[in-house]
Image (cartoon, rainbow, N blue to C red):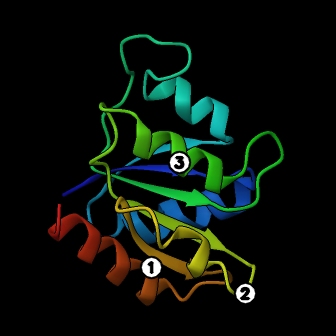
Amino acid sequence: MASILVVDDERDIVTLIKVILEKDGHAFTPVYGALEALAKLGLEPPQTPSCRPDLALIDLMMPEMDGLELTRRLAESPATKALPVIIMTAKDRSREMFEPFENVAAVIEKPFDPKGLREAVASAVASK
């Protein structure tokens, strides 16, 4: 199964996603902010990555750096530009913001349906 990086500042959401995705056999790396994600991926500061996920689930609204900026940085880096991203958001009309990014496999709305999340993950991993 896939190795998944989950980036969300809400620990309860991260725990819920972990429970849902581990049932499908996915490996799970939680991070609680965009800066932590950039560090784990070895982008900022430049270093050897501590994880190499097959997929990133990224919350749109986070305090230090939002999901849009994180997605942009992933898309611009040669090391992560092919990493599929699923955006999680509670905001309406967020899909349009991510249309220019080729690395965005899906945008799902919070609260999300567990089945819909599992299907989005399966589709993103299959298309990689």
Marks 2,1: beta carbons within 8 A: no
Residue 118 in picture, x, y percent from top left = 37, 78
Quadrant location of the C terminus in the rendered image:
bottom left
**Badge number at residue 92:** 2
Q: What secondary structure is found at the residue carrying circle 1?
A: helix
> Given the image, on which type of amino acid does mark 1 rest?
Leu
Residue 51 in picture, x, y percent from top left = 36, 30
Q: Is residue 96 left or right of residue 61?
A: left
Between 117 and 84, the one lying in front of the other is: 84
Pointer 3 local density, CA inside 10 Å: few below 14, some 14–19, many at least 20: some
User: Mark 3 or mark 1, which is nearer the start of the sequence?
Assistant: 3
> Given the image, on which type of amino acid does mark 3 rest?
Arg
User: Mark 2 or mark 3, which is nearer the start of the sequence?
Assistant: 3
Q: Residue at x 54, y 89 (%)?
A: 113
**Badge number at residue 117:** 1
Q: Which one is closest to the eye, mark 1 or mark 3? A: 3
Between 22 and 44, the one lying in front of the other is: 44
User: Mark 1 or mark 2, which is nearer the start of the sequence?
Assistant: 2
Identify residue for label 3.
Answer: 72
> Given the image, on which type of amino acid does mark 2 rest?
Asp
**Whether residue 75 is situated above or below residue 98 in the rendered picture:** above
Residue 47 in picture, x, y percent from top left = 42, 10
Pointer 2 local density, CA inside 10 Å: few below 14, some 14–19, many at least 20: few
Q: CA distance from mark 2 to mark 1?
A: 17 Å
Q: CA distance from mark 1 to mark 3?
A: 22 Å
